[in-house]
Image (cartoon, rainbow, N blue to C red):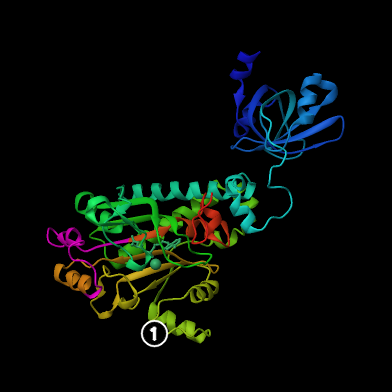
Amino acid sequence: MSKMRLMNTTTIAHLKDHVGSAVTLKGWIYNKRSSGKISFLQMRDGSGTIQAVVVQSEVEPAVWEASEKITLESSVHLMGTVSKHPKLENVFELQVSGIEIVQLADEDYPIGKKEHGPDFLLQNRHLWLRAPSQRAIQRVRNTIINGIYEYLNREGFIKIDSPILTPNACEGTTELFEMDYFDEGKAYLSQSGQLYIEAAIFSVGRCFDFGPVFRAEKSKTRRHLTEFWMMDAEAAFVEHAGNMEIQEGLIVHVVKKVLAKNQEELALLERDQEPLKKIEGPFIRKTHAEVVAELREMGSDIQENDDLGADDETMLTKKYDKPIFVEKYPAEVKAFYMKRDPENPKVALCADLLAPEGYGEVIGGSQREDDYETLLGRIREHGLSEEAFAWYLDLRKYGSVPHSGFGIGLERLTAWICGIQHIRETIPFPRMINRIYP
Ligand code: 4AD
Ligand code: MG
């Protein structure tokens, strides 16, 4: 019996190959109802969900008893015959013949059918992750990650892992998580691996990293986490315009892949797919100066030399149905490493990519300053330590080349593609200024 059972163990995703056969499924009961003589157990196993039907008159008393006492979230092995759903395509049922309870869950599973507030759900994130919507988001996130690897590998980028413990700041000293590092003084958690993958392009030409980064900024908004996942890409001999083309190709590829692979998840999330279907190149390209004029006309009080505020990004991106590159920001609001526009040294050769539907910035990128003296000047202007950046300056001494790169915030991209309002739902365990548990 037990040998038979092991042989027929399968997953819900594979049931179409087992119609009419006896199988074993291993998973969790997430819902149940009983009519006294028949009980319906809703089971998930990670690969899908299924309704399992237990008919009292057709099973041994012990099996019926098990179906009666089973609690929500109990882990089980269910044995039975696979049948097709009478009406729905590609939906199957299990006519149960045996039940083995692996662990009978405590009866007080905190996440019930009723609506819970975000604080309660976040406090129970370890359990909330089991909810259908949360599972769907994680599946889309997985597709996005794979899509990014796929596109970049195809375009000749190889993965180079950058360090997380670093001796210097990449994006801004006010946003650093700091610690004492043995006898070496202070160390910081990385804000972006960019500077390190810049070093690596002189070896491999094109590369990317993909990992957690940390920002100690005190922003409490729907777009900010203190720990999030960033993909930084960097390429030698690529200038500002080429940099945007790579980003455009990447976003188009990822959106298409999600549309192809995650129909079920998008439907479950009630994501309107029409806006996603319109994501094709070329994206809109506007300079910061053009955008400021446009926003002022729309009622914003943004000034010539201001960075775009969250409200500005929301307003602008609701107006268009394609992503927008906002190019050439005033250099003073951007990072020290960005190359200036030779035609107007007040602006940087940079672009932020803003996602439509009010989402706003998902990518930040630029051409990098490749001249030694100019970069040294910027490091001094920004009050950064020459000593700490000596290695970064070396890259401009030995075979310097024009080069560019960009960084994608995975959670912001996932939130947009899933149509989720707050990015905290797109990361398994969000870290925010007021939350570190669980
Ligand atoms: O624009 P950022 O700060 O750019 C950089 O860090 C560059 N060094 C990247 C590069 O050129 N390689 O961050 C890049 C992206 C943003 O566009 C945004 O999507 C995301 O990272 N991001 C955040 N996501 C969640 N929470 C935060 N606090 C974020 N800050 C930035
Ligand atoms: Mg940015």
Image position of 253 (left or right of 403): right
- The residue where tag 1 is placed is 304
Q: Nearer the viewer, residue 227 or 145?
A: 227
Q: Residue 328: x percent and y percent? A: 34, 75
Image position of 323 (left or right of 169): right
Q: Looking at the picture, which amino acid does disc 1 mark?
A: Glu
Q: Nearer the viewer, residue 107 or 127?
A: 107
Q: Nearer the viewer, residue 361 or 163?
A: 163
Q: Which residues are magenta?
A: 381-405
Q: Report the image quarter containing ligand 2.
A: bottom left
- Picture residue at 16% right of the left edge, 68% below the top: 371
Residue located farthest toward the left when viewing the structure as drawn: 398
- Picture residue at 12% right of the left edge, 58% below the top: 398
Q: Residue 23: x percent and y percent? A: 66, 23
Question: How many discs mark residues in the rendered view?
Answer: 1
Q: Nearer the viewer, residue 254 or 122?
A: 122
Does the rendering let one see residue 429?
A: yes
- Picture residue at 18% right of the left edge, 73% below the top: 377
Quadrant location of residue 49?
A: top right
Prevailing secondary structure class for the magenta stretch in the rendered image:
loop
Q: Is residue 354 above or below residue 15?
A: below
Quadrant location of residue 353?
A: bottom left
Q: Residue 88: x percent and y percent? A: 73, 40
User: Is residue 63 inside the magenta stretch?
Assistant: no
Quadrant location of residue 197?
A: bottom left
